[in-house]
Amino acid sequence: GLGLVLGLLISMRKNHDYSQIILLKPEDFRLNMRKGQLIDIRSHEAFEAKRINGSRNFEKMSLFASLHKFRKDQAIFLVDESNNLHVKKVSRKLIKKGYHPVYVLETGIEKYPFSLKEEN
């Protein structure tokens, strides 16, 4: 009955391998980001102002309406303003949806020391 269903749900929840969320320093992120899908989850305005060249913009949770645009056989590289709660939530949710590994830019874009594409 219900106990079995709840037990199953609980055991399913435990199976998400959050060790597949990996924080990368900017140097390592930059070296590897071309090997996967580079996703910027900042606001559209912030993304338009400056971004890592080659990144695609999906604002925060709206990204989950666009999952059909992502490949499960490629790593995801996530960029946010900083390494904050939002990017952690998005990372966990991606893992739950079967996307892994997820690499997060540890410093966020605000402390990214490399050149960014900027709108003039």
Image (cartoon, helix red, strand yellow):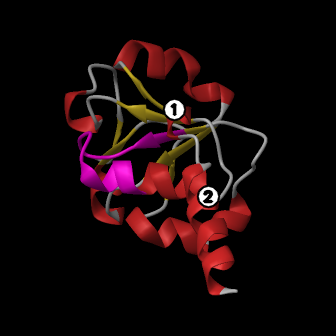
Q: Quadrant of residue 43?
A: bottom left
**Foreground of the two, 1 or 36:** 1
| Residue 24 position by quadrant | top left
Q: Amino acid type of disc 2?
A: Ser
Q: Position of residue 14 (x, y in %)?
A: 55, 52
Quote the CA–CA distance across marks 1 and 2: 17 Å
In the displayed orientation, state which residue is furthest to the bottom: 1
Q: Nearer the viewer, residue 105 or 30?
A: 105
Residue 67 in percent (x, y) is at 65, 65
Which residue is disc 1 drawn over? 19
Q: In this picture, is 37 found above or below 56?
A: above
User: Is 88 included in the stretch rendered in magenta?
Assistant: yes
Which residues are the magenta region?
Answer: 77-89
Q: Where is residue 94 drawn, in percent x and y?
A: 56, 54
Please tell me which residue is depicted at 56% across the width and 27% down the height of the picture.
33
| Label placed on residue 11 | 2
- Residue 3 in magenta stretch: no
Residue mark closest to the camera, 1 vs 2: 2
